[in-house]
Image (cartoon, rainbow, N blue to C red):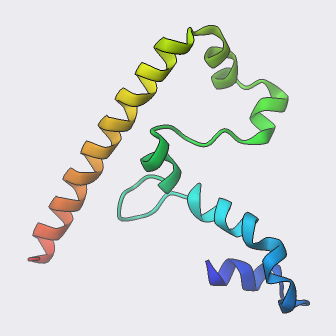
């Protein structure tokens, strides 16, 4: 996080607060090696929707507009639970390999 902020504020380090939102977004939407997924996906059960996807009406956005709200929420919750189970399994496996 700090390295991202430093890169963005080379010339004016006192303006770090102006790029904090961008740095947080970058960290939350970048896959982590330990989980092989993004923190955003672990939290919400799906990838973040980028503003450009909305403007360009990506396939994912078009499909999302076609399904019923209740079905979408149920599907989203199921995907979230599935990702959480996979993450727990990977974390447990990683810890057992390290002997912890």
In which image quadrant can residue 19 be found? Answer: bottom right
In which image quadrant can residue 5 be found? Answer: bottom right
Identity of the residue drawn at 75% across and 64% down: 22
Where residue 15 appears, as percent x and y from the top left, is: 86, 84
Would residue 38 appear left or right of 88 to someone viewing this image?
right
Where residue 37 appears, as percent x and y from the top left, is: 44, 52
In which image quadrant can residue 90 be found? Answer: bottom left
Q: Nearer the viewer, residue 39 or 77?
A: 77
Direction front: furthest residue: 70
Q: Is residue 63 above or below residue 55?
A: above
Q: Nearer the viewer, residue 78 or 55?
A: 78
Where residue 61 appears, as percent x and y from the top left, is: 68, 23
Q: Is residue 48 above or below residue 63?
A: below
Would residue 76 appear left or right of 30 to someone viewing this image?
left
Identity of the residue drawn at 69% across and 17% down: 62
Name the image quarter holding the C terminus.
bottom left
In this rendering, the count of numbered labels is 0
Q: Nearer the viewer, residue 72 or 29?
A: 72
Identity of the residue drawn at 65% across and 83% down: 3
Where residue 6 appears, as percent x and y from the top left, is: 74, 86
Name the image quarter holding the N terminus.
bottom right
Q: Is residue 2 above or below residue 32?
A: below
Identity of the residue drawn at 10% across and 68% down: 96
Q: Is residue 8 above or below residue 49?
A: below
Direction right: furthest residue: 11
């Amino acid at each position: 996080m700090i390295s991202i902020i430093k890169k963005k504020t080379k010339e004016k380090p006192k303006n770090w607060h102006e790029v904090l939102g961008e740095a947080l977004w970058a960290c939350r939407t970048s896959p982590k090696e330990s989980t092989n997924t993004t923190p955003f996906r672990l939290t919400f059960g799906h990838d973040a929707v980028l503003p450009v996807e909305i403007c360009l009406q990506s396939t994912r956005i078009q499909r999302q507009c076609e399904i019923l709200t209740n079905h979408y929420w149920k599907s989203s919750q199921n995907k979230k639970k599935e990702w959480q189970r996979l993450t727990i399994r990977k974390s447990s496996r990683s810890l057992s390999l390290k002997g912890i």
